Image: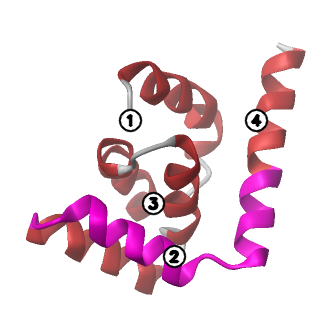
Amino acid sequence: MKSSEIHEISNQISKELRLFSDPVRLIVPHLLTHAKNRRDFYILFELSKFNSTRNQILNIIKKDQNIIEKLNELIKKRSNLTLLKRINFTIKKIDKAEHTN
């Protein structure tokens, strides 16, 4: 992901990030580093809210072998319609908040 995209996403989620638990807040920099685009970041971010999936993500990152490929496999395996709806809702909410500011 480009540094401009990382900066943009960081600005978008910074206000709401304090509402999440410490493990979720601590994994965000890893997700920003290893996600290949904005959509993948938001999917991984939503998945990281669940303890078991967060542990899988951290294990993939710790092994440091084919990280992007393995995260993409996890995204394909774990993405479902409900998750994608939540991600779209989150993106719309963030965009709406930006336009009102």
Q: Main secondary structure of the magenta part?
A: helix
Among numbered discs 3 and 4, the one appearing first in the sequence: 3
Does residue 68 belong to the magenta stretch?
yes
- Amino acid at dot 1: Met
Q: Nearer the viewer, mark 3 or mark 4?
A: 4
Q: Nearer the viewer, mark 3 or mark 2?
A: 2
Residue 5 percent across, percent down from the top left: 48, 26
Residue 34 percent across, percent down from the top left: 30, 49
- Amino acid at dot 3: Val
Q: Which residue is mark 4?
A: 94
Tag 2 secondary structure:
helix
Above or below residue 7? Residue 56 is below
Magenta-colored span: 64-89
Among numbered discs 1 and 4, the one appearing first in the sequence: 1
Is disc 1 in contact with disc 3, using a CB cutoff of under 8 Å?
no
Among numbered discs 1 and 3, the one appearing first in the sequence: 1
Q: Which residue is mark 1?
A: 1
Among numbered discs 3 and 2, the one appearing first in the sequence: 3
Q: Which residue is mark 3?
A: 24
Residue 80's image quarter? bottom right
Residue 79's image quarter? bottom right
Is disc 3 in contact with disc 4, using a CB cutoff of under 8 Å?
no
- Please identify the quadrant where the C terminus is shown: top right
Q: Residue at x 44, y 18 (%)?
A: 4
Tag 3 secondary structure:
helix
Label 3 and label 4: CA atoms lie apart by 18 Å
